[in-house]
């Protein structure tokens, strides 16, 4: 980012009006004062799916759980799970897909074609030069091969819950969910846990992890084979297209001229397509990949919890579906609702625009300088710097309020309710067994990890 030093307001105004877009962009970003730079950083994070979702997931999952932790084992296994899971979700696709598999599977591609690998399948097939030259027939199998090679990512997410079970067994010598969650507040010692139960949990975890490794290897072998052989086979090229964009395939099958067709089609293309997004010529995490990994993770959570205890399974069923939903869609649902509210009130008219498809769009961070320059030329009695500051403030409001609402609602509220609900279930079960009224105190102790 360029720094502007010793430039008067008038000079800066003249310079920013006459320079090209790239130069104007850099100058305007560098003119933000200390109070606005954090807002700009926040906006920048929001437009990077990997880093944004990593921060959001950690904030809305780990931090509230840590606040309501129930024991040392609970805190340890939750931290083990959340941080590794976030890394798998948000960084593995780029690292494995871009830095490893892309380099390995594009070695035989001509140099002039390698740059097109980051394009989506739709963009490749929309490029007449690539289609007419036959380059698309080579690119699609390579892209599908890279994607299949990344099967290890959802497989790792599925296996992670079982790895957590092994971690807790190894470190805390227990697989008893009642002790891990510190549900019995009247007991000073751990409950007697049978070795048979520990062995069952251990063997199941190892079996599922081995299965995940097998699926990963199958995906890798299939990906390498497809990348090598696909360019010579029309059938494999068609399969490659459908592997990358199953959502587009389904959208094309929808009946035409129906009210729901366009919205459902857009949803399928956003969340069912598995192709990578392109981020400055590099393969990046897409919404479809995020959805596939999150849903796979739910089944891992459920199966691993079922191995340990019915209460663990019920806790997963209470919490994880909502977390998966939030992980996939993030704050976008709240943001869209908030955008519609602002649009109706004509707030931030220079930022919130309705497209011909009746969709509300907000410009990206990179587009703000151009808008600021155009506004300054149109209004004449202002400067690009002044308009740019207004745009940054407005975009921060549009983005930050839904984000904070999601944090408070999905994070703190869900974690607290889930802890209380599990304790209630345990107390109710014990009351029935003892033929006594359930205990009145069901609220988990905050920071109970320090209780002895």
Image: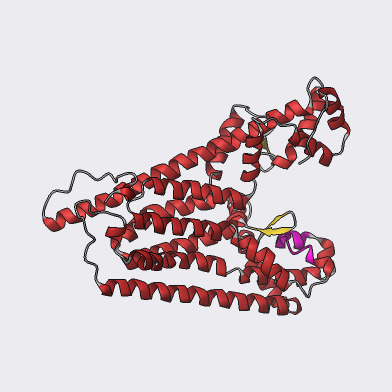
Q: Position of residue 333 (x, y in %)?
A: 53, 43
Asked whether residue 129 is in view, the answer is yes
Q: Position of residue 311 (x, y in %)?
A: 29, 59
Which of these two is toward me, 353 or 9? 9
Give the side of residue 60 with respect to residue 344, left or right: left
Residues shaded magenta: 114-126
163 lies left or right of 234:
left
| Residue 116 among those drawn in magenta | yes
Image quarter for residue 187?
bottom left
Front-lying residue, 198 or 295: 198
Residue 196 lies in quadrant: bottom left
The residue most toward the right is 18
Percent of width and height locating residue 146: 66, 69
Q: Is residue 281 magenta?
A: no
Say if residue 360 shows up in the picture. Answer: no
Which residue is depicted at the point 69% across and 72% down?
Answer: 238
Above or below 4: residue 109:
below
Image quadrant holding the N terminus, namely: top right
């Amino acid at each position: 980012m360029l720094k502007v030093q010793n430039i008067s307001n008038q000079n800066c105004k003249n310079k920013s009006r006459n320079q090209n877009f790239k130069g104007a962009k850099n100058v305007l970003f560098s003119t933000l004062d200390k109070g606005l730079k954090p807002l700009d950083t926040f906006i920048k994070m929001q437009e990077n799916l990997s880093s944004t979702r990593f921060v959001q997931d950690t904030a809305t999952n780990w931090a509230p759980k840590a606040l309501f932790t129930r024991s040392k084992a609970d805190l340890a296994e939750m931290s083990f799970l959340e941080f590794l899971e976030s890394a798998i979700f948000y960084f593995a696709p780029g690292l494995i897909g871009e830095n490893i598999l892309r380099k390995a599977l594009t070695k035989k591609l001509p140099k002039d074609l390698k740059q097109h690998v980051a394009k989506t399948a739709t963009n490749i097939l929309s490029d007449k030069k690539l289609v007419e030259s036959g380059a698309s027939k080579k690119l699609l199998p390579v892209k599908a091969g890279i994607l299949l090679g990344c099967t290890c990512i959802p497989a790792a997410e599925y296996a992670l819950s079982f790895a957590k079970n092994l971690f807790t067994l190894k470190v805390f010598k227990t697989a008893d969910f009642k002790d891990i969650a510190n549900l019995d507040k009247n007991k000073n010692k751990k409950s007697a846990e049978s070795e048979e139960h520990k062995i069952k949990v251990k063997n199941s975890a190892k079996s599922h992890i081995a299965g995940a490794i097998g699926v990963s290897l199958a995906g890798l072998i299939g990906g390498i084979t497809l990348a090598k052989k696909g360019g010579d086979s029309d059938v494999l090229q068609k399969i490659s297209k459908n592997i990358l964009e199953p959502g587009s395939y389904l959208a094309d099958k929808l009946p035409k001229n129906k009210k729901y067709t366009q919205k459902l089609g857009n949803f399928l293309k956003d969340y069912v397509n598995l192709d990578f997004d392109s981020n400055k010529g590099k393969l990046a995490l897409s919404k479809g990949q995020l959805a596939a990994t999150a849903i796979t993770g739910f089944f891992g959570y459920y199966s691993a919890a079922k191995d340990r205890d019915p209460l663990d399974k019920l806790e997963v069923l209470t919490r994880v579906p909502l977390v998966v939903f939030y992980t996939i869609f993030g704050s976008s649902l709240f943001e869209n609702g908030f955008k519609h509210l602002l649009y109706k009130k004509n707030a931030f008219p220079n930022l919130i625009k309705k497209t011909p498809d009746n969709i509300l769009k907000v410009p990206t961070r990179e587009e703000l300088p151009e808008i600021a320059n155009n506004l300054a030329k149109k209004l004449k009695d202002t400067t690009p710097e002044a308009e740019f500051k207004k745009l940054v403030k407005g975009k921060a409001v549009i983005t930050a309020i839904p984000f904070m609402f999601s944090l408070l609602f999905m994070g703190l509220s869900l974690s607290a309710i889930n802890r209380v609900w599990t304790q209630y279930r345990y107390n109710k079960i014990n009351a029935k067994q003892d033929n006594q009224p359930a205990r009145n105190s069901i609220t988990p102790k905050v920071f109970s990890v320090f209780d002895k």
